[in-house]
Image: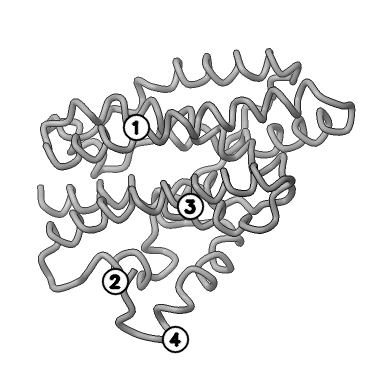
Amino acid sequence: MKENLYKYILGIADNSLILGQRMGALTGHGPSLETDIACTNISLDLFGQVRSYYQYAAKIAGDGRTEDDIAMLRKEREYVNVLLVEQPDTDFAYTMARQFLFDVYHFMFLTELQKSKDLTLAAIATKSIKEVSYHKRFSSDWIKRLGDGTELSNQKMQNAIDNLWTYTDELFHQTEADKAMVKDGIGVDVTKLKEGYYKQVIEVLEEATLNIPESKYFQKGGKEGIHTEHMGYLLSDLQYMQRAYPNMEW
C-alpha cells in the first residue's frame, strides 16, 4: 500500500506541477496586466498545492528525499502527469484552452478527493478546491470571451480546442496505483467522472459558439511516464536551478 500511495500522490501532484510551470512561463507575457497577474497567481496556487502533496510523498517514501528532490530531481520518465498539461503555450488561446480542459477535471477530482479515507489527502483537497474553483471560472470565462468574440479569436480558440481535445481522455485512465487506492477507499475513481466532465465542457463550448471536436482518436502515455517532445524542454527550465545549485530549497 505504501508504494501505491506514493505513486498515487505523484499522479495527482505532477499534473499541478507541470501546469504550474506552464502558467508561470506566461508571467510578463499576458495580453493585459490584469490577466498576466491572474495567470501568475494560478501558477502560484498550483505550486502551493504541489508542495503539500510532495511533502506528504516524502513522508510516505521515508528514504531521506525532500519535497524538492521529488519535485525537481526526477528523470523525465519518472514524471507521471497527463499529456494535456505539458502542451506548450502556442498562443493565449492554447493557454486558456489547456487550463480550461484541466480545470473542469481538477475541480471534479478534488470534490471527490475530499471524501478520501486518507485524511491528509482529504485536507489538501479541501484547501485546494477553493483555488481551483476560481481557476475554473477564470478559464471558462476566457473560453466564452474568445470563442464568442471576433472571427479571429473564435478561429484561434477553435484551433486550440481541436488540437488539445485529443489529450482529454487520458484524464480518466487508471494506473495500477489508481485502482489500488480506489479499492482502499483512498483514491478517486476517475472513470466515473468522464460523463459529467464532457457534459460540462460541451456546455461551455456551446455557449462560446465553438464546435465540439468530432475526433475519436485520443493520445495517452503521460501517466506511464511516456511524454511528448515538449516535456524535456519544460524540465530543463524547471530543474535548472536545482541541478546547477544543489540543495536549494523552495
- Measure how far apart labels 1 and 2 are at the Cα level: 26 Å
Q: Which residue ends up furthest to the front in the rendered image?
A: 33
> Which residue is label 4 attached to?
244
> Which residue is label 1 attached to?
129
> Which residue is rendered at x = 14% and y = 62% of the image?
61
The disc placed on residue 69 is: 2
- Measure how far apart labels 2 and 4 are at the Cα level: 13 Å
Q: How is the image coloured?
A: one colour
- Measure how far apart labels 1 and 3 are at the Cα level: 15 Å
Q: In the structure shown, which secondary structural element does the residue marked by tag 1 occupy?
A: helix
- Depth check, front residue: 99 or 213: 99
Does label 1 or label 3 sit earlier along the sequence?
3
Task: Kindly identify the amino acid type of the residue bearing the numbered disc 2.
Answer: Asp
> Which residue is label 3 attached to?
20
Q: Which residue ends up furthest to the bottom in the rendered image?
A: 245
* Contact between labelled residues 2 and 3, with CB atoms less than 8 Å apart: no
Q: Can you give x and y, in whole percent of width and height, for residue 156 in the image? A: 80, 36
- Measure how far apart labels 4 and 3 are at the Cα level: 21 Å
Q: Which residue ends up furthest to the right in the rendered image?
A: 151
Task: Kindly identify the amino acid type of the residue bearing the numbered disc 1.
Answer: Ile
> Which residue is rendered at x = 42% and y = 57% of the image?
225
